[in-house]
């Protein structure tokens, strides 16, 4: 079965369920859903980094959602630092580990903790606070990212001739970037009244979200190239892992929230 066919089948099977859950779940259950997605993504990041403490890191990082939920932002920052300290203590106690391996793993673990908090947990918390503003906002964000990804894929595949960032992701093209911008603009402008945007603001926000979605994709592509892997996992046939599918939220979720707070 071709990759495109796998991609389409997986999308058709999962997209309605995800959209339904984004809309129907009450706020606390929605947060728990986001926490579960984050946990899997953090586990994938830790596995890619080659650390042996994948489960411990995933649990410790996800616990940071608790102070965020209660709006204890200072405690959240202290928790991020505490997690790094916990990992250092574990390595100090593991005296039988060879020096070179211990240092390499400790640096990998600390990098995963910092990356996961600021590029997975925080963006997903912004998805949650979008739902606090209005039940439909996370769904609009989701649809804009899907439209952006689909347009970028098909326009880039059929018309892409000019490389966007060959040193990071050789397959990405400038034409694909324009597709990403177009897809996001269509959804945001279609929902501009629900978002409380003027048509002009919707066009600007939609375009920016298309660019930011590609920026998140490039960030994850760079990480995978450094770690010499194609996908974060094989969880989703044709799509890779959860980490491969949520990268577009990294910058778009905080950005949309800020735009909405300035409007409401």
Image (spheres, helix red, strand yellow):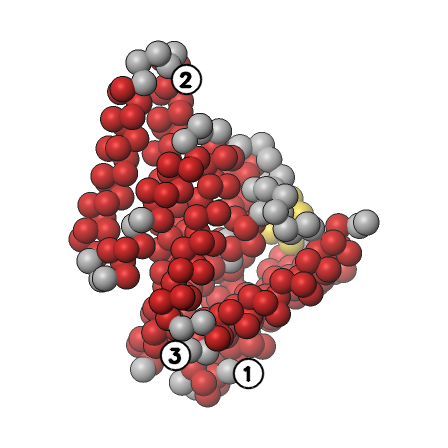
Q: Which mark is first along the chain, 2 or 1? A: 2
Residue 122 appears in the rendering: yes
Q: Position of residue 236 (x, y in %)?
A: 63, 51
Residue at 45%, 85% (x, y): give it.
194
Residue 83, numbered circle: none
SS at mark 2? helix
Q: Marks 1/2: CA distance?
A: 53 Å
Does residue 242 appear left or right of residue 95 in this picture?
right
Residue receiving disc 2: 101
Q: Marks 2/3: CA distance?
A: 48 Å
Crowdedness near tag 1: few (<14), some (14–19) or many (≥20) residues, C-alpha within 10 Å: some
Dot in front, 1 or 3: 3
Residue 190, numbered circle: 1
Residue receiving disc 3: 134
Q: Marks 1/3: CA distance?
A: 17 Å
Residue 157 appears in the rendering: no
Identify whether 147 is placed above or below 73: below
Crowdedness near tag 2: few (<14), some (14–19) or many (≥20) residues, C-alpha within 10 Å: few
Residue at 44%, 28% (x, y): give it.
52
SS at mark 1? helix
Q: Quadrant of residue 132?
A: bottom left
Does residue 91 appear left or right of residue 179 in this picture?
left
Observer-nearest of 65 and 252: 65
Crowdedness near tag 3: few (<14), some (14–19) or many (≥20) residues, C-alpha within 10 Å: few
Q: Position of residue 226 (x, y in %)?
A: 52, 33
SS at mark 3? loop
Q: Position of residue 124 (x, y in %)?
A: 40, 59
Q: Which mark is first along the chain, 3 or 2? A: 2
């Amino acid at each position: 079965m071709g990759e495109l066919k796998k991609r389409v089948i997986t999308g058709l099977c999962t997209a309605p369920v995800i959209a339904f859950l984004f809309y129907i779940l009450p706020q606390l259950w929605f947060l728990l859903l986001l926490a579960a997605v984050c946990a899997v993504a953090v586990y994938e990041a830790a596995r890619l980094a080659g650390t042996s403490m994948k489960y411990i890191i995933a649990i410790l990082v996800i616990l940071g959602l608790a102070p965020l939920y209660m709006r204890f932002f200072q405690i959240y920052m202290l928790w991020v630092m505490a997690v790094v300290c916990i990992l250092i203590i574990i390595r100090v106690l593991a005296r039988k580990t060879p020096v070179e391996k211990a240092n390499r793993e400790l640096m990998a673990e600390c990098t995963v903790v910092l990356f996961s908090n600021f590029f997975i947990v925080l963006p997903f918390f912004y998805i949650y606070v979008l739902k606090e503003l209005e039940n439909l906002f996370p769904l609009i964000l989701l649809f804009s990212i899907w439209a952006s990804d689909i347009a970028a894929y098909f326009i880039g595949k059929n018309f892409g001739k000019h490389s966007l960032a060959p040193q990071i992701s050789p397959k990405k093209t400038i034409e694909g970037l324009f597709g990403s911008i177009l897809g996001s603009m269509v959804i945001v402008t279609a929902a501009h009244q629900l978002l409380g945007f003027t048509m002009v603001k919707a066009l600007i926000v939609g375009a920016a979200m298309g660019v930011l979605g590609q920026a998140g994709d490039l960030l994850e592509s760079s990480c995978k190239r450094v770690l010499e892997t194609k996908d974060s996992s094989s969880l989703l046939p044709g799509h890779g892992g959860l980490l491969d599918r949520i990268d577009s939220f990294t910058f778009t979720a905080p950005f949309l929230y800020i735009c909405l707070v300035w409007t409401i």
